[in-house]
Image: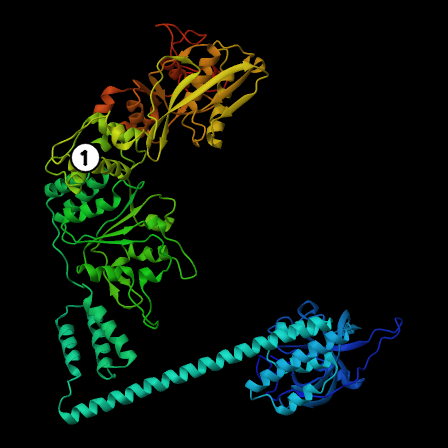
Amino acid sequence: MRGSGQAVSPAESVSNATPQRKSMIPKIFNRDAETEEKPVLPMLPLRDIVIFPHMVAPLFVGRPKSVNALADAMNRDKHVFLATQRKAKTDEPNPKDIHDLGTIGTVLQLLRLPDGTVKALVEGKQRARISRYLEKEDFFQVELDLLQDSPLSDAERVALMRAVTEAFGEYAKINKNISKDLVKSVSSITDPSQLCDTIASQFNFKIEEKQRLLESIDLSDRLSHLLRLIKMEVEIYETDQRLKARVKDQMEKTQRNYYLNEQMRAIKKEMGAEEDPGDDLKELEKRIKKKRMPKDAAAKVRQEFKKLKLMTPMSAEATVVRNYIEWIIGIPWFESSKIQTDITEAEKILDEDHFGLEKPKERIVEYLAVQSLVKKIRGPILCLVGPPGVGKTSLAKSVSRATGRRFVRQSLGGVRDEAEIRGHRRTYIGAMPGKIIQSLKKVGVNNPVFCLDEVDKMSMDFRGDPSAALLEVLDPEQNFAFNDHYLDLDYDLSNILFITTANTLPDIPLPLQDRMEIIRLPGYTEYEKYHIAKDFLIPKQAKANGLEEHPPKFSKAAVATIINQYTREAGVRNLEREIASICRKIARRLTKEGKLRSVQVTAKSIGKYLGPARFRKSQIEKEDHIGMVTGLAWTQVGGELLTVEAITMPGKGEVSITGKLGDVMKESAQAAVSYVRSRTERMMIDTEFHKKLDLHIHVPEGAIPKDGPSAGTAICTALVSILTRRPVRRDIAMTGELTLRGRVLPIGGLKEKILAAHRGGIKKVIIPKENQKDLRDIPAEIAKQVEIVAVEHMDEVLPHALVHKEGESLFKDGTIAFGLLPEAESSGLDSSKPLI
């Protein structure tokens, strides 16, 4: 609103009349003497208007305080201070809501209107700044500091005034609302301040820009800023005129084309050669009648078809309506493929395509078994989570084969627009349904296997969050009535078997995780990789490289060498690349020789084909060492042997921990040191060792980051070994988290760790007792070759790990293994039960 009072509308607007201007108006206040008292005036807060000096404008005033301020001014010398509010919507402003700098003005005319408001005609005189507010209940009264413009050099004054005047003249040429008389009047102004204020009042700048001009005391800055604003207004006005002309030309062109088309139709009709424009519509009508659809979809199509028949075929709206009808009748509402429920055949197909992956296979077979017993079952929503290359997407294809369904895949990597899932509304130009409906139209049935690949790679931006749109798609309680924005019709997705894939679970939003059945696909073991290479990859690459009739024969050692020394991955993609490389080199060699034969590939010949080994295979030490323990680690590409070393040096008890270890692993080492110090007497270790010796714990391969608590038992064993000078058996590996009381807590990745131990030649593996439940995942042939010892306490680990004579005790009390803790009585615990 403009003005300071409540007018006819809540917005309090200024009259539509153009503000009047006066020429040179003398200033009413002078401050020649510093001792002169500061002027005190009533203040009028303004909304949506800035009053400049040399400007006359009408104001509608309705707020009681503002009316009182005007009354006070009229009773005195008619002078009033005009300041603009920071926010126009504020009805009861306080000093913080009002700009400090404003204009001293004179009330020229005052008129009371029938609705109680007051119309005031005010004239701006001089800039002033509020020094302080005086206490006054019925209106604002302020003490002011008068402001003087900064001086300009003659050259700068002339240059800036000329530039501003020319810019205003240029604007007046393109804007016919600016009169020639006003341009002449502006050209005759010689005072730079008056010129700036007069021109600024003619433009509809933003309030912030006008206030900035008012607050600019520096004349050079004020004129320069005004010049920039005028040039911007000129550019905006010219652009607006160009756009209007372009739209006008386009409308004329459309009307001309329509007129010509109508004339052509009339000419053809006169000649008797007109084609019936209703042929296409008749064909479309036949398709609509033939298509089986739900009632609401059929009603929608009939309604849109009626509109289409009334439209001109060449109109843009007819194309939009026709596309909409084509989409509705092209979607498979009731078309479905017959589902195979033969469990034996399904298991055979799954085993043919993939080795291992028992859990997802078992879940698919369970679904088929239920499908054979129940006529209507909602499709399961599975999420396969695992490292790259383990066969998640290919498993989805195998599921479609095993179930007899068609397969459709949609990659979600990089999708960041919600409309990719739900579609665009028809109000947008070029609108289309989302990828879900598009894929179903492409596949032609309503019950395919739908693979949503890389569901963890979605992102979000200002266009929405696609993962939120997937919540409805993947919710069995909601997806029977999925509503695409383009179709605006409910579509049943409950017959679809959704399979999503992801590399990492934390990147999937929790609400989305809650709607899916998570099945983890761990990395393949060396044993599984060998069988995959033997049964799948080698025959596949032999065929791809023209060696199908005489395939190369890979020895078991050759495949193991490729797996261990040339690849390091959870999946088998790099393994397939290396096998393909060998097959290509064999094909090249046989082509040169001119005869085809089967080539034997051995472990020794691998280097000839693939070059030097890229990775070092983990192996056990050749002899027992003091302070060197073999631990076990889990990585995304499988298990690894992890050596832990410890040494002592004369010192003052400092503990060094190196090997690029994470915080958790460092804390685990500190806990091991504290545990050993608390058990020195029982383990027959010098009780003062922490005052005489420095300890250094190191985990080799220092460039590789390592973390986790599962090396606690290995670190503790290394410390006990170095302090008791007993070697550690080289054929033993161990894993387990250690507490300060010596308890061995469970760990993760047991399958991969035991397979790594077997691969490295370890004969015995010590694991936490609580991990015994995980031993069922270990292949039977591996479990037979590795002795697995489950322990609950560190005192059970040491007799297995440290070299000692048969029957020799490692503890002061003579026990050979862990039984009762000596501190049980002193701690108040029940000494009849072991501390677990």
Q: Is residue 512 above or below residue 764?
A: below
Residue of label 1: 589
Image point (22%, 72%), residue name: 325
* 248 relative to 317 in the view: left or right: right
Quadrant of the snapshot with the C terminus = top left
User: Is residue 94 at least partly visible in the picture?
Assistant: yes
Residue density around tag 1, few if under 14, some if 14–19, many if 20 or more, within 10 Å: few
Q: Which residue type carries mark 1?
A: Arg
48 vs 607, nearest the viewer:
607
- Residue 619: image x %, image y %? 33, 21
Work out which residue is located at the far bottom of the displayed protein and give it: 270
511 vs 426, nearest the viewer:
426
- Residue 729: image x %, image y %? 36, 14
- Residue 585: image x %, image y %? 22, 36
Q: Is residue 67 above or below residue 674?
A: below
- Residue 443: image x %, image y %? 19, 58
Q: Secondary structure at mark 1?
A: helix
Question: In which quadrant of the rendered view does residue 129 lie?
Answer: bottom right
Question: In which quadrant of the rendered view does residue 178 lie?
Answer: bottom right
**What kind of colouring is applied to the model shown?**
rainbow
Q: Is residue 691 above or below residue 58?
A: above
689 vs 267, nearest the viewer:
267
Image point (62%, 80%), residue name: 167
Q: Is residue 198 above or below residue 422?
A: below
Image point (28%, 60%), residue name: 435
* 149 relative to 169 in the view: left or right: right
Quadrant of the snapshot with the N terminus = bottom right
Image point (29%, 26%), residue name: 755
